[in-house]
Image (cartoon, coloured by chain):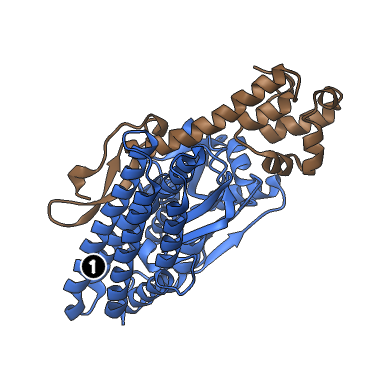
Amino acid sequence: MSAPAPQQTFQHSHAAHCESGVIGSLLRHHGANASEPMVFGLSAALAFAYLPFIKVGGLPLVSYRMPPRAIIKGIRQAFAIRFRFETFRSVEAGQARLDDLLAQGTIVGLQTSVFWLPYFPQDMRFHFNAHNLLVYGKEGDEYLISDPIGDVPVRCATADLNRARFAKGALAPKGLLYYPDNTPRAQADWPAVQRALKKTCRGMLAPFPLVGVRGMRLLAGRFAKLDAQHSNTGHFIGNVIRMQEEIGTGGGGFRFLYAAFLQEAAQFAPAEKRTALENMAERMLAIGDDWRAFALAAARMLRGRDAMNPQHMADLLRAQADREEAFFRDLRKLAA
Amino acid sequence: MRIDEVPQDDNPSLGGYRRAVYARDADGRMVLAASTGWEVEEITNQDAVEQLNALANETRTRVEAGLTSPLEYWMHVRRMDLTLLAQNAGLWRWRVRRHFKPQRFAALSPAMLERYASALNIPVAQLVRLP
């Protein structure tokens, strides 16, 4: 009797964020005890960046997390795992390699465009090239796909998946596929948690104007200068909210994910720090709620339920920056 | 966010999908919960979709007025911009821009039309006219 095919043993999991979801699923499939929040936290993926010189659809980029592939790269040390990354020049070579790996029973991670995936809802399909998903098998002309954004596995025709893997443009995936090269460590430990906490604190408290709490204050300054009457003001604010709530779960979502990480990480902490970490988790949860209140205030202005008031949005954002600054200063002391 | 506060607003743009969010359950554990969407997400997402649709509709009017070619219309329908279309077709941006001129577009070779059609993933017959 041969071992059951991976198609049978692989477990799809629903996740808040594609990259942490994919890596969590992969690690668990290879025997590690890695929840999505642990993967997100241990790879120090939480961040804030306001990059006015990078335009997305003509509007400045605002990100609430580290750039694509930061999780895949950031998780390696904590679980002592290596990944093999392969990109391809031609669609044919990319497809042949994927089919080959699937035939060997490998669960393969892919970077794809969102726009060309037919199972995505029409209104969610934009040209964003750094989506992550897992392929766990192929039946006839259809790939069996575990997309962590969906609550159930899906299928995708070969031609469609090829197009999504070889989409052009910013962050073009070039057919990127990846899979673990060795068996991961079964558990994370306190030193790994400590390292990740310190790294996130360093990013959030960095002395550079565009990132962390300073990035929030800079963006608040931009808000305060907006003209409430100008037609673009709504789009500018709406875009910040959309990046927060829509694109890969965004600000509130990432803060909740981080809160879940802090709570789970507490079990690895030395006994005297456990309660303190659990309290930090509660505080992060409250910060996530404040981000949601920020988004709600903006949405009400966009829909004309409240008067457009950029100054108020600036004040809310500054308050968020103050709260996160205090939070990460305390967290840094705990991680020491 | 408590688990009973997880929004269930049935966002049409999620097309029946459910989003995963982390929330606090009655025992204080942070757990995964499925959400059918939040109205705030719907508002900002629809805002973005409407902007793209408005762009396509405006281009359609210009095609009808003979000011641009159907190529520009289909580019917007596919939610692309000039840079992305040029990258997908493997052409310089200035060449694509020239093909927005109706006379030039009408004179394109079948091979060039095929190139645009595959970049946009639509049949050639569809590319050369408005729907």
The count of marks equals 1
Examine the rendered structure and indicate whether residue A280 appears above or below residue B115.
below
Q: Which residue is mark 1?
A: A280
Q: Residue at x 49, y 40 (%)?
A: A230
Q: Residue at x 21, y 43 (%)?
A: B5
Measuring from the top left, give residue B110's x and y in whole percent. 83, 26
Relative to B126, A218 lies left or right: left
Measuring from the top left, give residue B106's x and y in whole percent. 83, 22
The hue in which chain B appears in the rendered picture of the protein: brown
Relative to A305, B118 lies left or right: right
Relative to B47, B79 lies left or right: right
Examine the rendered structure and indicate whether residue A160 appears above or below residue A272.
above
* Element class at badge 1: helix
Q: Residue at x 38, y 61 (%)?
A: A40
Q: Depth check: A183 or A154 in front?
A: A154
Relative to A335, A174 lies left or right: right
Q: Quadrant of residue B101?
A: top right
Measuring from the top left, give residue A238's x and y in whole percent. 44, 42
Q: Residue at x 71, y 33 (%)?
A: B118
Q: Quadrant of residue B131?
A: top right
| Label 1 chain ID | A
Q: Is residue A85 among what the camera can see?
A: yes
Q: Depth check: A35 or A171 in front?
A: A171
Q: Amino acid at mark 1?
A: Met
Examine the rendered structure and indicate whether residue A302 appears above or below residue A100.
above
Q: Residues within 10 Å of mark 1 (few under 14, many from 20)?
A: many
Measuring from the top left, give residue A253's x and y in whole percent. 34, 52
What chain is colored blue?
Answer: A
Q: Depth check: A253 or B20 in front?
A: A253
